[in-house]
Image (cartoon, rainbow, N blue to C red):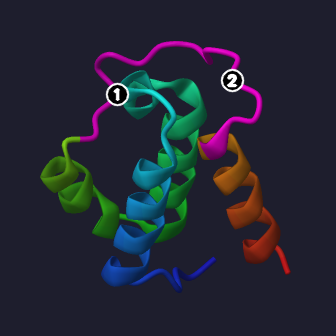
Amino acid sequence: MASTLTRQGIQELLERALASFRHDKCLTSECFLVYVAQLGIDAGAEIHSLLTEMGIDYQHAHSCMGCDPCPPADLFAEYLQARNQ
């Protein structure tokens, strides 16, 4: 699948996710990082410099904290639905 995500589009998706966090630990939650990983798959190398610039990495990942609702997971589901239409 050819990427239709631009650097600006990726940045907007990531900024929206960051703004949705209920806790500081959301930045390293699997809920958010799986979303980031999918964006990376869809966008390719374009995302890596953004992740570095935004301070997002996988080194301190932890499991879901059980928030209900979980904004990062909801945004990931929303992204997948839009992508698959």
Judging from the image, what secondary structure is the residue with disc 1 in? loop
**Kind of residue at badge 1:** Tyr
Q: Residue at x 43, y 80 (%)?
A: 9
38 or 30: which is nearer to us?
A: 30
Residue that lies at the very extreme toward the front in this rendered image = 22
Residue pointed to by mark 1: 58
Work out how far the residue at label 1 is from the one at label 2, CA to CA, in angstroms. 20 Å
**Kind of residue at badge 2:** Cys
Residue pointed to by mark 2: 67
Q: Which residues are magenta?
A: 56-71
**Residue 14 in which image quadrant:** bottom left
Magenta span has 66?
yes
Please tell me the numbered disc located at residue 38.
Answer: none
**Tags 1 and 2 touching, CB below 8 Å:** no
Question: Horizontal placement of 21 versus 6: left or right?
Answer: right
Question: Horizontal placement of 53 versus 31: left or right?
Answer: left
Q: Position of residue 6 (x, y in %)?
A: 39, 84
Quadrant of the snapshot with the N terminus: bottom right
Magenta span has 40?
no
Q: Up-down: is 77 above or below 63?
A: below
Q: Residue at x 39, y 33 (%)?
A: 27
